[in-house]
Amino acid sequence: MPRDFGYINARIHGLRSRLLGQDFYSEALNATDFKAYTSILAQTPYLPEVEEAQSRFQGIKIVDQAVGRNFYKTARSILNFSEGRAGELISLLLLRYDLNNIKAITRAKHSGRSTVDIEAGLLPAGSLKPAVLEAVASAPDIGGVAQALLITKTPLKGAFFAAAMRYSSDGDLYLLELALDKAYFKIIFKSLKELRAPKRFFRLAKREVDATNLTTALSVRSGSGLTEGLFVGGGLEIGRSAFETLASDTSSSAFQVLSGTSFAGVADAASLSEAETLIRAVMAGHARGLAADALNIGLAANYLRLKEAEVAKLRLLARGKYYGVAREVLAKELGDA
Amino acid sequence: MAEQIAPTRSNLLQRRDQLRLANRGVDLLKRKRDALIAEFFGLVKDSLAARRALADTSKEAYFSLFLANAWDGPEAVESLSLAVAGNLEVGIEIENIFGVKVPQVQPPETGTQMSFSPIGAGPRTLDAAHQFRGLTEALIKVAATETRLRRIGEEIKKTSRRVNALEQVVIPGILVQIKQVTSVLEQRALEEVTVLKRIKAKLEQREEAKKAEDQAGAVG
């Protein structure tokens, strides 16, 4: 019998209760060094992964591997206890990881890197399992990757195959990735429609497109200014003209296009990193708003966002303690943690 | 100790020519050394500035990588690094500074066109990539200025050694030789004068004796 959101969300509530609280971050910030920090981390639900990583790695890699492994296990566990429509919606939330993994493999094939190099660029938190990714990564070239993906269940396989065919004639990685990124968002919206996702979740997906467009525009703003084909349609607040303005106009007046949107605060950001923090905070706020619905996808979406943020904060603290970064600097970077 | 040479007039003339040449060489080498020292001090300023820029850029670049690895994740950073193929090509031209061949290193053409799609790419990773491009340029600048500095420094040392060798060894050696030859030649000239004076005296004596004999014959 397909499990409904009542059961899934109860499990997610359980997972959420295991997220690290303010006490942990205060204690971790006060840790004297990296060793003390790993000891504190080993007193949390990350204990099994920390112990396993300590037996195989040294230094920063202990925490990177432990939190990466924990995130992978969490994502896999959610996918395992979710079935039917709910499971498909949750798979969509994790499709980004499949996209990133496929991109990492494609980049490595394009630049002629070895399979060992690819391993470090993969985080198998999506529907493509590590064994499948290993098989795909061992393909000799991008054409081989497309062939290997065809026998998987990833919804990205069709788009990748078409893009890989084009790549075989022009050898342009940029265009291949662009086609894949566009296909990713198309698949998301198509699937949300087919799965009759709640309107609020649809809106969150549209805001996700806005956040992506805004980040892309700000990223290319100081670079070449080439914006052609970078705009992703389907957003809620940021249209093509706003995107073009932000991407090509480097003056501060360009940020006027954001006034009246959820992202208006980005205009005050001093750097790209600061802007990204603000965008992340806006998206976290929208996801939090959805979490109240106990019988829908919102709780899972919010939990995954919180878990990703937790993993990032743990990596940040690990690096801070390893390199002896001042407490104040770390506290500032951690934000409201 | 100066080499012993035959004390002849032609050797004396040759040594005097050599002395003139050595003095001219010292003068030229000193001028070259002064010019190189001026160039060296100009480069020291550039080199210190390049070192400072490298230290600042590397601090910023490594901190941005620190943040990229934390917020975007090491997998995302590794993934983007996979898109970059091949090595950076650095252009090198050889410049001639007062006869010293120094390399002029041109920063690599990195271009602004991305080889991957920026959609969904972590902004902190892109920022770190941008910072590391700057770090590469700073590193190349340091390598270029310090290579020039080392080459010019080596040349200053070499030129100073040459000046010292000429001033302390070659010129004093020639002067000793000139002195030796001159003194031998002067001695010889003195000897010749003495011999000639003696011959002259003998001839005069002989002439006087002959005159006395002739006068005695006439009386007898």
Image (spheres, coloured by chain):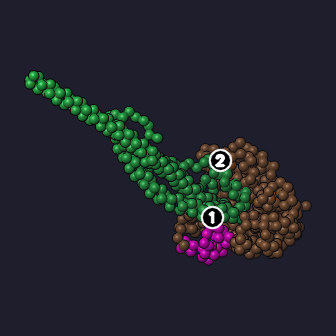
Type of the residue with mark 2? Ser
**How many angstroms separate mark 2 from mark 1 (CA)?**
28 Å
Whether residue A261 is visible, yes or no, is: no
Rendered location of residue B93, percent (x, y): 48, 47
Dividing the picture into quadrants, the one containing residue A85 is bottom right
Disc assigned to residue A199: none
Residue at left offset 63%, top offset 63%: B59
Residue displayed at 83% across by 57% down: A53
Residue B145 counted in the magenta span? no
Query: In the image, residue A51 lies at what x, y percent?
Result: 86, 59
Quadrant of the drawing holding the C terminus of chain A: bottom right
Image quadrant assignment for residue A83: bottom right
Q: Which chain is brown?
A: A
Q: Amino acid at mark 1?
A: Glu
Above or below: residue B197 compared with residue B74: above
Q: Residue furthest right?
A: A1
- Letter of the chain in green: B
Label 2 marks a residue whose chain is A
**With respect to residue A86, does B92 lie above or below?**
above
Residue bearing the label numbered 1? B60
First to last magenta residue range: A253-278
Q: Label 2 belongs to which residue?
A: A111
Q: Residue at x 69, y 67 (%)?
A: A208
Give SS at disc 1: helix
